[in-house]
Image (cartoon, rainbow, N blue to C red):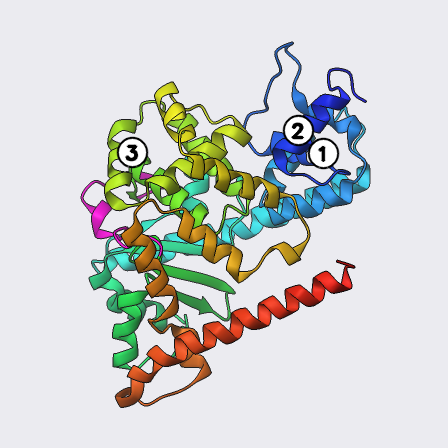
Amino acid sequence: MTPGITESGTAAIEARNGAPPHTPSENALLLCCARRRLKVCDDGDDELRRLIPEIKDWDYVLRTAARHGLTPFLFWQLKAACDGPIPASFMDKLSDQFHRNAAGNLLLTAELRSISGLFEEHGISAVPYKGPALALLLYGDTAFRRFDDLDLLLRRRDIPKATALLLSIGYRSPYTMSCAREAAYLETQRQQLFAHPGRRVCVELHWGFAQTFLAPSLDSDHFWGRLSKGSLEGVWTNALAPEDLLLVLCVHGCKHLWERLAWLCDVAELVAAHPGMDWEKLLAEARALGVRRMLSLGLFLAHDLLDAPLPEAVRRDVHDDAIIKSLSGRVRANLFTENLLSHGPSRSLLFHYEVRERRLDGARYCYHITIPPTPAEWTALDLPDPFSFLYYLVRPLRLIKKHSAAQLKRLAGFRLAGF
């Protein structure tokens, strides 16, 4: 046991993170590295150097860091703590992953600049967010974040024109849509995916920050009047205001059940970088949009796991909701589990229902996930436009079949495991 960390202290870390009994130090190490600046203990020493000698399963650390998008941070922090007993083979693998990610990110950033310039030439205002833009804003370097695609926010009216421009330079959409299907898609979805076969790049055009079933009022027009300017490798682009970006990050994290620590790291870094954030206005707006609990959950987790510096009044506010505490417990319990049997459609459906504070939004959520058709229905069954209304029957039938199959697989898995 490393000096300064007692058995009871390690057990407390384990209980806090929902970690399996054999990896409390490994998980604590990952949490320690999920930040730009290392955490310093009360005695002036840093926690990372205390944890390194306790690590027994470096393969688990490498594997879990990749799943959580923490490979860049892990490499940077461990490289700075090179005097610890870290296996050379582990650092070689970590270094290789870091540099490959950094090289890929540079190519994606160049492509983003090119697409942004193309849109601007044709009178389309776009807001790059997540990916390179977020990495540069929060960390000052695209290498410190893992991303596989490019995200651009546009006004909904500009989507057809932007789509035509992407198609003209070699991008392709995975869906072939008639006029009727395109109208339905724009009504129920808020993003459209394009891929370039030659460049192996995926681009997502967004006209909102989440599907209508998750955040009905969170569309691009809501934030367009208060954009700021940001730099994308020397090129000035549109950027979301810090308060708006924080709201978007928290909704995105809730959409994906906060399954990656990198998303919480983004929230913690954004809060730390903007101490003058207008919290009163932000919380009031989140309540008006029906995403107050989503915002509170992201702030709660970022503060609890990564020491995000919240104002005292905000900290008390986000800790007062009993449902937030329940949801955060579930998130922590699943952060470091490798048992996929605990992950299923029913878990995400229940989580998304509980994370909203208004009953009407809950009812809307139930409707939108069960009735309006999606591209999955179009792919499964190709109906002529005059019969497109039948997709409203196909959607619930497909969901029943899908979830029933998932439950059967889960049950079979438990039986194989001896339960």
In the image, what residue type sits under mark 2?
Ile
Residue 227: in magenta span: yes
Q: Please give the name of the residue rendered at 75% of the width and 39% of the height, measured from the top-left corner.
A: 91
Residue toward you, 389 or 118:
389
**Residue 283, label in figure:** 3
- Outermost residue, top side: 43
Instruction: Kindly state the secondary structure of the residue where label 1 is placed.
Output: helix
Task: Let me know if residue 209 appears in the view.
Answer: yes
Q: Quadrant of the C terminus?
A: bottom right
Q: Please give the name of the residue rendered at 35% of the width and 71% of the height, measured from the top-left corner.
A: 371
Residue 333: in magenta span: no
Q: Is residue 164 above or below residue 303?
A: below
Q: Is residue 399 left or right of residue 75?
A: left
Q: Please give the name of the residue rendered at 67% of the width and 45% of the height, measured from the top-left corner.
A: 64
Residue that numbered label 2 is attached to: 13
Who comes first in sequence, dot 2 or dot 1?
Answer: 2
Q: CA distance from mark 3 to mark 2?
A: 30 Å
Residue that numbered label 1 is attached to: 24
Residue 338, given in percent of the width and then of the height, sits at 68, 51
Q: Does the residue at mark 2 contact the one at mark 1 (Cβ under 8 Å)?
A: yes
